[in-house]
Every structure is written in structure tokens, then in C-alpha cells.
Amino acid sequence: MQARLAILVLLFLWGTARVPAQQAVQLEPRFVPGQSLVYQADVHIVRDGGTEGVIEDPHAARHVATSLGARLRLEVLSVARDSGGRLQQVRLRARYEQLAVRTESDVPDPQIADREEQLRRLEGRALEFTVDAEGQVHDITGLAEALPEQSQAVREWLAQVRFRVAHPRAGIRVGQSWEEEEAQPVAVPLAGYVRRMRSTYLRNEACSAGTPTPAAALAEEPCAVILTRSALVRRRAPADPAPEEFRRRGLRTAGGMSGSGETLSYVSLRTGLLVSATQASREQFDLTVSSEAGQQVRYRARIETHSQITLLALDEPGAP
């Protein structure tokens, strides 16, 4: 009996020695000055709805589907880290090497063709911006000169591009979940809304499993697979939901909105760089803007978005 017990103990110890506890990993991007990354981004957006009230246009399109494909080259200009080596911010230059846009609507709309032409003007243009430790984009330069008519839309798009997966600074392990909250998630005139996100570290898998065309340097390397689900919720209901800039102009807002989304991200365990991400989301709005004179405009819309971003190439400084 004692001999059998000793054998069982030895087998248990041998098994635990071969399967050590997984260490927490940090998915911080390892940006290096001189590094160059090429991403392919494909976005498809369908919007149904329109406006009612004093500016209602009976001939305006109420169903619009837009497809945007862009090949974006990112060049790392500078990197700032704290005394512990943690990334504080990175300065990037983005150049649209290729850009294609196509829009379909239920009625002819000359403004759609104008917007398409404005977006196409981004091809070959370069912008510079800074990404901080939380993944937020700021200090954008070159945008007003390249695309003054669509500068705000491009700013909002850049703000949605996540070059890192937010996670606890202590690191994460397979199976772990964590939550974060993003204030003022969308540019709509209603206060009190936030986007709540819950992420789960599902597994480790070859980076090529997330996309058929990953960067060759990372294709067979292991990636962390992260699933993030988000929900647009009203954390508080202020007495006056109109943002400050609306109140200054004598405008009041009312209504509600809702939304949800899901993103599956593949992040290189070696470099911390985003290799691919697939996202699907849906949002609904029912908003009314009123003036002091009693005029009202109501905007109702349902928006569905599907996007895919893939790292196509990674050039390291000094690499052959």
C-alpha cells in the first residue's frame, strides 16, 4: 500500500513539474523608432434612418451602405517610456498607400459622391499622431491640410483604431476576464452614456489562424486571442442631457441610444502588436434637438458596422 502511494506521489510531482502554472503576459506593443507596419483595414457600414422636422428632406437617402478599404503604412517616429520601461506614448506617421471607397443608397444623392471624392483624396497623404499608454489618439497633424472637409470624421475614426488591447497592468492569463469603461464613446449630443467592455483571454493560437494574410514575420508565431464584448449604456440620466456646447448655443437634446459589439483580436505574444481584429457592432439612435424658438429636429437611425484589420507587413530597423 505504501509503495503504491509513493508511486502515485511521484507521478503527481512529475506531472506538475511538466505543466507549470502559466505566467501572466503583458501585451504591450514593442514599438521601436524606425519600425514600419503595413495594415489592411476593410470597413462596411450600413445606415438606415434619417431626420424629421424643420430640416427634413424628403429626397434624402434613408438607406446608405458604405464600403471602405485602405492599406495604411505606419512608421514609428519616436517612443517614450517611463523609468520602469513601460510605454508612455508613441509618435506615428500614417500614410494611406491605397484607398478605395464605394457607397450605395436607396435614392441618388450628389453629396455621397462628394464625400467619396474627399475620402479618395487621402490616398498618398500622410498624417502624424500620438498614441498614449491607454491607446488614445491625440496631437494629430497634417489632417486639416489633407482633408479639411472630413477632418472631424477622420479624427473619430483614428480614435476608434486600437493599436493595443487594454488589459490590467499586472498582466493576464488564459481564461482571465476584465472590464473597462469608455466615457463619451460616440459623437452624439446626449450626456451620460458610456461604453462598457468585457474582455476574455480565450487561448493562444498561431497568428495565422485569425486571418489568411498575416505578416510573414508573425504568421506561425503564437498569438493571444482576446474576445471583447461591448455595450452602450446610460450610466446616469442628467436633468439636462444636452452637452455644454449645445447649451451655449441655446439648444436642448433628448432621446436615447443603445448599442452592442463584439471584437476578436489576435495579438502577438512576442511583439505585443495587433496582428488582426474582426469587429461587428450595432447601434440605434432616437434623438431630438430643440431650439429656444421651439423648432425641433428628430434623428432616428440604425447603424451596423463590420470591420477587419490585418497586419500585412512588419519591417524592423536593421532587419535584412
Image (tube, grey):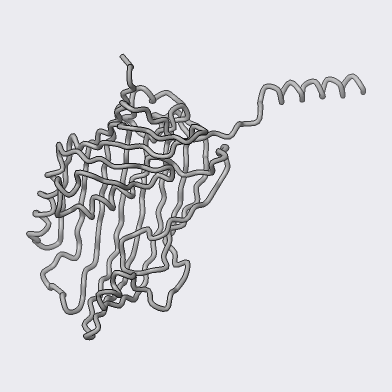
Q: Is residue 89 above or below residue 256?
A: above
Q: Residue at x 25, y 33 (%)?
A: 73
Q: Quadrant of residue 266?
A: top left
Give the left or right position of residue 161, taking residue 19 as reference: left
Single out the residue that lies furthest toward the bottom.
294
- The residue lying at 31 percent from left, 26 percent from top is 34
Q: From the viewer's side, name the closer residue of 300 and 142.
A: 142
- Which residue sits furthest right? 1
Q: Hey, which residue is sitting farthest front in the picture?
A: 83
| Residue 288 in which image quadrant | bottom left
Pinpoint residue 192: horizontal percent, then vertical percent: 42, 68
Instruction: Give coordinates of residue 270: x percent, y percent.
Output: 46, 27
Above or below, 11 relative to 176: above
Q: Residue at x 39, y 29 (%)?
A: 208
- Tell me the residue at 55%/38% (across/down): 171
Quadrant location of the N terminus? top right
Q: Nearer the viewer, residue 32 or 283?
A: 32
Q: Image quarter for residue 195?
A: bottom left
Measuring from the top left, give residue 118's x and y in whole percent.
12, 50
Q: Quadrant of the C terminus?
A: top left
Q: Is residue 166 above or below residue 319?
A: below
Q: In the image, residue 203 lies at what x, y percent?
A: 52, 36
- In the foreground, 249 or 238: 249
